[in-house]
Image (spheres, rainbow, N blue to C red):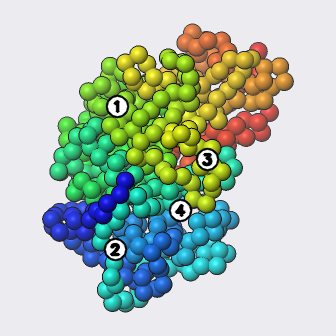
Amino acid sequence: MSGLQPGWLEHRASVLPGHTAAVFGSTRVTYAELHRRAAALGSALVYGGIRPGDRVALLAANSLEFIESVHAVPRAGAILVPLNSRLATDELEWQLRDSGARALLCHQPTWAAATKAASAAGIPALPLPLKRESPAAALRDSFVLDDVHSIIYTSGTTGRPKGAMLTFGNFWASAAASAFNLGLDPNDRWLACMPLFHVGGLSILLRSVIYGTTAVIHPAFDEAGVNRALREDGVSIVSVVSTMLQRMLDADALPYPESVRVVMVGGGPVPKPLLERALDRGLPVVQTYGLTEAASQVATITPSEAVAHLGSAGKPLITTAVRINAPEGEPGEILVAGPTITSGYWNNPEATAGALIDGWLHTGDIGRIDSEGYLYVLDRRDDLIVSGGENVYPAEVESAILAYPGIRAAAVVGLADQEWGQLVAAAIVAEPGADVAGLQSFLRERLAGFKVPRIIHEFPELPVTANGKVLRRTVRESLEGTGAAPIQ
């Protein structure tokens, strides 16, 4: 993609100056005000020495400062590098060095971690809001779609994280595809209650500006706060993961208003019992499948299809092609192509060559496409369990476990075993007083014998990432540390 395009925020500030661009707590910022604040920060960066093509990292919690930085860094001609605020100093330093960041923007909640990491990487940490007064600089007010907007580091479940380069065109194609699929209402308010440094949160900020709608930002996920936002604050779309949806439903039994158009659930396969429960409560839940390298969504089922195709992530969005690297109808690796796909990983040609082959992104996820063209995401390839020569998909077993009364959360992993190669093991979180003694018998009625966990261990809670995904690797280490013996 090429050709000069007007800046999204500049356009919205011109045609919708008084429209609310973002809401954070009690503060509402119009497009005109957001444009002014982003321009002030962009000018400060330019006069501080930032040049076109430089990388500027951002370590910030969900905040107005984060939103301003997302628009200010590109206006200065630089590439945004959002960092995970939960990383350790060594991990932050590595990403700063790997990206070649010239500066690190941060604010008060992240100041201590930012200064340590920046000092170790030999770059300045710049506190937000920047206090220096700078004259207005000649800022970038247009861009080419092929220009890199941001470098987002993957979670790094295996080895070092990789910095996916996402262009303006990637985000533009993703926003267009989502609008075609879910529809667009000028009065939409999309709630971001997950971290903005992940692609799911960042894409909400950029889509809202492209659409000219309002982004509602919460500092972190809180089930009561999200329910209140849906009922009282006019939020029409919200993005969550399965564990968050479950907590929303557990928080109260009050109805949800018809103004809620879409509850988008991603981050992995959604257990059918949870989908059914949400639909029974009247929430318009749609399962989505996406990843960092695809600028968020790849496939999202529409609300009208969700009931008839329970458990499916829908069909590919209009800008995206999907195929399964396996014989027709069988599970295999999900391959994705189209204008939303990253051009590669920053400073990592080997990883780029391994992931992008003949124009197709090899996702590492396992799925199948049914006879009607609907995508079902089964699991991560790295999480696949092979027990006695049989493939076991953890998400399928987890879904069955969660259908048992009193089970709040579950994670299924494979543990090394000399006889079977791997044993299926489950970590569960149960409600107080729940009788889990009958769980194995319950599962034998619903799953093939080789899929039923041989080890089941209760934990007070399961470890999760910043955006609510269960950390199966940590669960596996915890189960190995318990020394639990297989159930005979």
Residue plotted at (37% across, 90% down): 133
Residue tagged by mark 3? Answer: 353
Instruction: Look at the image and tell me whether residue 289 can be seen.
Output: yes
Which mark's residue is nearer the viewer, 3 or 4?
Answer: 3
Residue tagged by mark 2? Answer: 140
Name the amino acid type tagged 1.
Ile
Label 3 close to label 4 by CB (< 8 Å): no
Relative to 370, is 40 above or below?
below
Label 4 close to label 1 by CB (< 8 Å): no
* Mark 3 or 2, nearer chain start: 2
Name the amino acid type tagged 2.
Arg
Q: Secondary structure at mark 1?
A: loop
Residue tagged by mark 1? Answer: 301
Q: Label 3: few (<14), some or many (≥20) within 10 Å?
A: few
Q: Secondary structure at mark 3?
A: helix
* Mark 3 or 1, nearer chain start: 1
* Mark 3 or 4, nearer chain start: 4
User: How far across and how far down the image is residue 481, in percent?
Assistant: 77, 39
Name the amino acid type tagged 4.
Leu
Residue tagged by mark 4? Answer: 83
Residue plotted at (72% across, 17% down): 389
Q: Secondary structure at mark 2?
A: loop
User: How far across and how far down the image is residue 469, in percent?
Assistant: 53, 42
Q: CA distance from mark 3 to mark 4?
A: 24 Å
